[in-house]
Amino acid sequence: MPIATAQRIYTIQVALLMLCYVVVLCISLRAIPLVSDRRIRVLIALTPVVPIVFVLGSMIQLLSRVDEMWRRIHLEAAALAAAMTAMLAATCGFLQNVGMPPLSGFWTFGALDVFYVISILFLRWRYR
C-alpha cells in the first residue's frame, strides 16, 4: 500500500475515532451522576477507553502498512511525545508544591496526542 494512502486512511480513522471519543466521554460524564449502582457507574466511566483502544489499533495498523522510514518517524514521534508529556506532568507536579491545584489525568491523553502531531511534523521536516 502506498504511504500516502496508508497515512490518509490512518488520519481519517483517527479523526473519526477521536470524535467518537469526545462524544462517548461527554455522554458518560452526563450519565454517571444519573446511575446509583457503583458497578454500573464504573462501567460507564470506562466507556471512553473503547475508542482509545481502537486508536491504538489504528496506529499498529499504520505501522504495518508503511516502510521502515515512516515506521521510524512514527516510533520516534511516539517516544518524543511520551517524553514531552512526562516532562509536562513532572513540571505540573512541581508547581503543585507552590499552590497550583492538582490536574486531572484527563489532560495526559490530549497532551500526548498534541505532542505526537507536533513531533510528526518536526520529524517529517527533519528527514526531508
Image (spheres, rainbow, N blue to C red):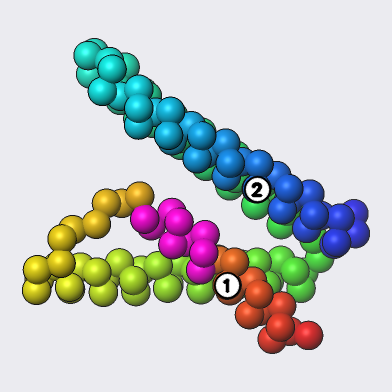
Task: Report the magenta stretch's main SS.
Answer: helix
Along the horizontal axis of the image, is 24 left or right of 17?
left
Side (left or right) of 34 relative to 76 = left
Q: Residues within 10 Å of mark 1 (few under 14, many from 20)?
A: some
Image point (57%, 44%), residue name: 18
Under mark 1, the amino acid is: Ile
Q: Quadrant of the N terminus?
A: bottom right
Determine if residue 53 is in view.
no
Say which quadrant the C terminus sits in.
bottom right
Residue that mark 2 sits on:
15
Picture quadrant where residue 47 is located: top left
> In the depicted view, which residue is nearer to us: 2 or 33?
33
- Outermost residue toward the right in this view: 2
Residue 88 percent coordinates (x, y)? 34, 71
Tell me where the magenta segment starts and ends, as one range.
107-115
Q: Earlier in the sequence, mark 1 or mark 2?
A: 2
Q: Is residue 111 magenta?
A: yes
Q: Secondary structure at mark 1?
A: helix
Q: Position of residue 77 (x, y in %)?
A: 58, 70
Say which element carries label 2: helix
Image coords of residue 104 (percent x, y):
27, 51
| Residue at 40% over, 67% down | 85
Mark 2 Cα within 10 Å, few/some/many (few <14, many 20+)? few
Above or below, comparing residue 84 to residue 56 in the picture = below
Q: Amino acid at mark 2?
A: Ala
Tell me, yes or no, whether the highlighted magenta stretch contains residue 58.
Answer: no
**Spatial CA span between label 1 and label 2:** 16 Å
In the rendered image, the vertical position of residue 59 relative to residue 54, given as above or below: below
- Asked if one can make out residue 52 in the rendered structure from this viewpoint, the answer is yes
Q: Which residue is mark 1?
A: 118
> Residue, x 90% and y 59% (percent of image)?
2
Residue 89: percent from the left, percent from the top? Answer: 30, 67
